[in-house]
Image (cartoon, grey):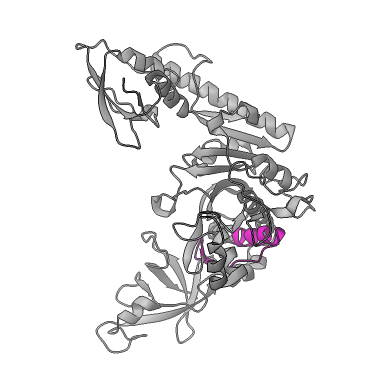
Amino acid sequence: MRRVVASPLRSQDIINTTHRFALHSWTSTKAYRIREPTAISSAFASVTSLALHKPSKPLHRIQLTISSMSTTAALSAGANDSITHVLAVCRTPEDAERVAAVAKEIAAAAAEVAATATGGPATATAAPRLLLHLDASTLPAHAVPQLDAAACCRYLAGKGSLSRGSNNSDSHAQGGIGDTTDCTTGGGSSNDGAGCTKLMGRVLLAAPLLGSTQDLLRTHGSALGDGVVAVADRQTSGKGRGGNVWTSPPGCLMFSALRRLRVPSPASAPFINYLVCIAVTRGVRRALQGCGLPAVPLRIKWPNDIYAEGVKVGGALIHTTWQGAGFNVITGIGLNVNNRSPTTCLDELVERVLWGAAAKQEQEQQQPQGQPVVRVHREAVLAGILGALEEVYDTFEQSGFSPLESEYLAAWLHSGQVLDFDDSEPTMATSTAAAAAAATAPANGGSGSRATTRLTIRGLSSSGFLLAEDYAGVRYELTPDGNSLDMMQGLIRRKVV
């Protein structure tokens, strides 16, 4: 008898039309016929309520993937997988009480939804789609995150170190440079206070798989409290600019952090992008320094992308809402730490700095196939960035962006960059490479088929946008048009009086 399994299964994937069930599967499928549709209904009882009517014919069609599991066990596993299990590590008993209250609210909401769907009373037996676990021992085996959230939370509280081998399942052999360098801050020594935070990471949520860490905090962040951080080993719907999806290969650090930022005016919103970029570059530098490794050449592409050696290795997506005398800021950050594709990562960048291209190639030939030479732990990078994020937020609240501007400009890619603007279309901006191809476009209104104004980027304007000037020293503020994925394209210019 052939056995079948459907995975992953979600309530929204189940379509009941004339007794034909379409279950989403990520592998190839085959069609099977079953005689007991009610068995399927009971298998999904903890996920959703299905209105299965008595069939007019005994045979029904269902798409399932071939597997060695039994049908009943497979369907039950699919139902359980629809529940998102999240570990919540808390710094204080008060933080734990707040998380427990949120978990109770989620369960009550699930019961209410189930009652509405079935037309019956709300019961505590209805399974919520999100379960928060304050005790790691209650997590199902498949829901244990690789990232060591407890060690990271202790380190941020100044009560521990990120010792070697703190990763759960992705730690590698330890040793010197000639072997595999296992990079975590402190090397097992106690925290000297450099990594401590007051707010960031007070509650640290961790899961092996989430749709989006930012969605999780947008839904529950305000109840979980200022400084809550959500981390996922993998994301299925990570957010990117313009509605794009940020891919999440294994080894990528993906997290979102909530902070209440008290500032005098909502006009300061553009600067939040720059604060986050400074925190990433500063935090990575400190994390590498903490495990005795050299800095890597991380650069900032305006407004909030992180580049190294000409390719993107990270980015941020900031969601802000103005309330009262400040912003509620949810910062989503993705950074390539151990994943060497699709571009490069911190592991590889460190190796290049340590040995150079030729020596690195020789070193790799001495390693087992697929074994990295350097392994930078995500816990160390997360702690470094969160510590730096709290620092820059505090500085911005107290003194504005001025004390941080030089650090930002030292890391960004755009000082002296030349942009050509078509005088007939003020919203068009092209980089120097594109401008060189347009040989018929003389700069600053000369004769030819098309007149352009050439501007050179000098820094940031007082309102947080690009500041540029033409050959005569006339200054312009450049703002994005909101339609271009690459924000250096489609810029709108405005003279600065």
- Depth check, front residue: 308 or 95: 308
- Residue 381 x/y as whole percent: 63, 54
Residue furthest to the left in view is 57
Q: Does residue 323 appear anywhere in the picture? A: no
- Residue 96 x/y as whole percent: 68, 31
Q: Which residues are magenta?
A: 278-307
Left/right placement of residue 139 relative to residue 305 reads right
Q: Residue at x 28, y 22 (%)?
A: 16
- Depth check, front residue: 454 or 234: 234
Choose top left, top right, bottom left or bottom right for residue 67: top left
Choose top left, top right, bottom left or bottom right for residue 426: bottom left
- Residue 147 x/y as whole percent: 60, 43
The correct choice, above or below, for 110 with respect to 339 in the image is above
Q: Does residue 353 appear anywhere in the picture? A: yes
Q: Residue at x 70, y 54 (%)?
A: 185
Count the marks: 0
The correct choice, above or below, for 135 with respect to 445 in the image is above
- 29 within the magenta span: no
Left/right placement of residue 453 relative to residue 344 reads left
Residue furthest to the bottom in view is 447
Left/right placement of residue 1 relative to residue 195 reads left
- Residue 318 x/y as whole percent: 52, 52
Q: Quadrant of the N terminus?
A: top left
The correct choice, above or below, for 187 with respect to 109 in the image is below
Q: Residue at x 62, y 41 (%)?
A: 168
- 294 within the magenta span: yes
- Depth check, front residue: 417 or 473: 417
